[in-house]
Amino acid sequence: MYTLSPMPLKTAEAIGARVQELGQAISVEYDFDMVISVLTGSFVFTADLCRAFAQGEKNTQREIRFIKASSYGNSTVSSGELKVSGMESLDLKEKKILLVDDILDTGRTLLALVGMIKSQGAAEVRSCVLLDKPSRRQVHMEADYCGFEIDDLFVVGYGLDYSDKYRLLPDIWTLKNS
């Protein structure tokens, strides 16, 4: 049985402010062609991030695509086995990609996804994650853009889940084993 921590780790207000900063910085620094969002945990983050990009003709012409990647299933611990779907339908040749994911943890998922995107002919790939857990890193992988660095905690809310629950919480919470 799991319960939420007594206080949110990151409030909706703090998340909103940071996502606005990230969106503005990315739109100034990186002239990308396509956003690839890693489902399911990053769907809320991706939507808010895309709305935070500076307004202009270029931003209205950018593509947004979704892939599914999972290694957790119904557990709080990664199985180590990455399952990816949706990459096969993407035309990435010569495109500059912004890869958006929820959490950079061991680094294995993000490293594998960047490799897959490059192998399909992308001209450039930059990554943006909502949360980074550097203490959990098992491979050399850093995100180009990061919302927050956090400790090794299992978190839910703002699109993040445990067994498909808690996604709709506006804040990010720690899940505790009771």
Image (tube, rainbow, N blue to C red):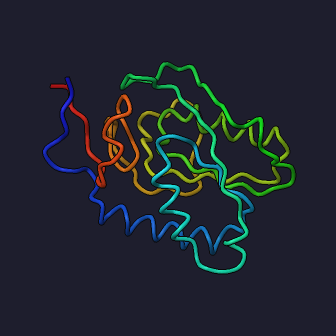
Residue 64 is situated, as x and y percent measured from the top left of the image, at: 66, 56
Most extreme residue toward the bottom is 56
Q: Residue at x 77, y 54 (%)?
A: 124
Q: Is 178 placed left or right of 39 in the picture? A: left
Q: Quarter of the image for the C terminus: give it.
A: top left
Residue 41 screen position, x and y as percent = 46, 42
Tell me the residue at 52%/25% (across/down). Answer: 71
Residue 76 vertical placement versus 86 (above, below): above
> In which quadrant of the rendered view does residue 147 lie?
bottom left
Would residue 159 be found to the left or right of residue 57 on screen? left
- For the image, the number of numbered tags is 0
In the image, residue 55 lies at what x, y percent?
Answer: 60, 79
Corner quadrant of residue 24? bottom right
Q: Position of residue 169 (x, y in %)?
A: 29, 49
User: Hey, which quadrant is residue 86 in on the image?
Assistant: top right
Front residue (pair 14, 46): 46
With 87 as the anchor, is 127 left or right in this view? Answer: left
Which quarter of the rendering shows the N terminus? top left
| For residue 79, above or below residue 96 | above
Residue 60 is left or right of residue 45, and the answer is right
Residue drawn 40% across the image and 54% down it? 148
Residue at 37% over, 50% down: 158
